[in-house]
Image (tube, rainbow, N blue to C red):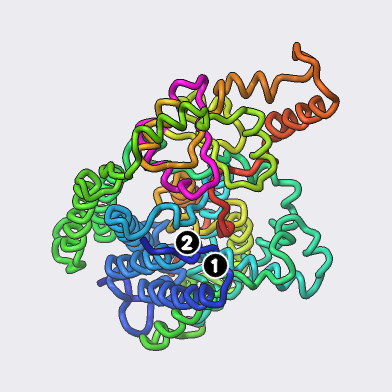
Amino acid sequence: MIETYFSANSLATANAFLVSLIIGVAFGWCLEQAGFGSSRRLAGIFYFRDMAVLKVMFSAVITAMLGLGFAFAFGVISPESLYVPETVLGAQILGGFIFGLGFMISGWCPGTAAVGVVSGKVDAIVFLVGAMLGSYVFNWFFPFIESWYVWGDRGVSYIYSELGYGFADFALLLTVVAVFAFWVSELIEEKFSFKMVAARNSGLWAFSVLILIAAVMVMAIGRSPISKYRVVETGIYASEVLQKVEAGKEHIEPEDVAREMLAGQKRIAVVDLRTRQEFDEWHIPGSVHANMSSLVQFLERYRSFDRIVLVSNGPVHPAQAWVVLQVYGFKNVMIMSEGLRGFFDRVLKPAALRMEALTPAEIEEIAHWRVMFLGSGMAVGSASPPGPGTE
Amino acid sequence: MSDISHEKGNPYLNPYLAGFLLGLTLLASFLILGTGLGASGGLARLTAWCGLCIYPEQVLESVYFGAWGDNPLNYYLVFMLAGIFLGGFVSALLNHRISVQTERGASYPAWKRLALALLGGVIAGFASRLARGCTSGMALTGTALLTTGGVAFLLATFAGGYVFAYFFRRQWHD
């Protein structure tokens, strides 16, 4: 397993800056080679004149996705070594729509405009000045639009698990979609003349076959014993697991979960095992949803956390999952006592409605919890790994 | 291929090969840095730095830029952006593709084209902060990782472009 600058927490060192510079050089070189130093070429996609944007971006996405698929399957890198940008669905759909408008109007986006500037394009310089103004305006308005910025926060969320697929199956599906999109793009550029497309020597046949074979291989490896999710050899004895059960060490009280989440000192992931529908209706702010069937893979990224807390309506599902996770060597997993029902009764229930006698400090703490978990919900940090900021 | 007619210099690289190499660059970034690519983040940091030079107190007290402290340039994406300029320059120079011009349709006035580039820039700069990334950091990186937000951003970007494209077509008319 290789350690990344991100997982070593050394992204802000001189070495990381040098690596970033070199990767940036390769990035800028690729963009220029693709012809993205030209706004006319970039804008071509919006008028179906030049589909280079789709071809280049989709090729890059598939290449990197399948490359990561191989890297995960062979244990070259673990998913937790990667910074995964969080999903804030509302902000990203709204932001994406507005961004697309700006991209289309100008014919530039920030990375390509940098390449445009060094190619001598005056419109690229003007675009970058505009983009800096736009960033400044965002900073200015941020206090007023903060609710948009956090609109639809889902933490780390993968499209395949949202749609009920596994990674490898979805990767193959997306590869098939990409090949289809490439051929349609060629047809669009040749005004739907099959003859002209056949006459083009674009290397697309070779590329199509290459990525389809790679996608099938990623899927095959994912299902073979090479994949680490199939190997159950953790050296854990049943007696150790049962001793933990006997000692009650697998439980954590709802109040302690609330305190740890708010204190923010420990890296704690609260993982909700209910159905997606129930999760969407209400969940503990900062918790993430996981499908029971893909739980082991999903939790890999939290393996290094101080604590993973499993919650459901009651304690049965988390307890069953806990046993499986012990087999896979997760030592940081706990079950929240009494589940979400307990969380409602012991954390969220107003002090005035409680039967037991409470000290003023307890009453104050309950009021604080209610504000933090039922109020705006924004004050609670997401359970996803603390990233360097998605930019 | 037909799509080089407007440019001087050497023809561009085959788009699938360029995409493949871009994908390998992204993969290298994942495996070494542990993060994806990004461009707007570095640009926003540069903006914050410019702001600090003019209005230090206001910028430091602001919620968004202020969180980056008094040296916002001390960040890996700033160096990546510098690399993009450098790599793009080397490639354009070696392939004789550097020429000072305002790209537009032959019959469209340059000042109008520049006004649209500025307007688009302001919109894209704002939107990339709202969405936490641009074409590189969100559409490319987020989609390659198959995050829900990355895919949603990518689809929304093309939706936004196609919905309004008709109204801005004249800038490319020859």
Residue B108 can be seen in this image = yes
Residue at image point 40% right, 33% down: A241
> At numbered mark 2, what does the secondary structure look like: helix, strand or loop?
loop
Q: Check the image and report above or below for B58 versus A325.
A: below
Locate the C terminus of chain A and report the quarter of the image it occupies. Answer: bottom right
The chain holding disc 2 is B
Q: On the picture, is A146 further left or further right than A361? A: left
- The image quadrant of residue B112 is bottom right
Which of A18/B85 is in front? A18
Residue A11, disc: 1
Which range is magenta? A291-318
Residue A173 can be seen in this image = no
Q: On the picture, is A30 further left or further right than A354? A: left
Q: Position of residue B32 (x, y in %)?
A: 42, 68
Q: Position of residue A207 (x, y in %)?
A: 21, 62
Which of B30/B149 is in front? B30
Q: Position of residue A258 (x, y in %)?
A: 66, 33
Residue at image point 55% right, 70% down: B76
The kind of residue tagged 1 is: Leu
Answer whether labels 2 and 1 touch (C-beta < 8 Å).
yes
Q: Does mark 1 fall on the same chain as mark 2?
A: no
Residue at image point 32% right, 83% down: B10
Q: Check the image and report above or below for A10 versus A227.
A: below
Circle 1 crowding by C-alpha within 10 Å: few under 14, some 14–19, many from 20: many
Q: On the picture, is A65 further left or further right than B55? A: left
Mark count: 2
The kind of residue tagged 2 is: Thr
Which of A281/A201 is in front? A281
The chain holding disc 1 is A
In the rendered image, which residue does mark 2 sit on?
Answer: B35
Q: Position of residue B103 (x, y in %)?
A: 49, 74
> At numbered mark 1, what does the secondary structure look like: helix, strand or loop?
loop
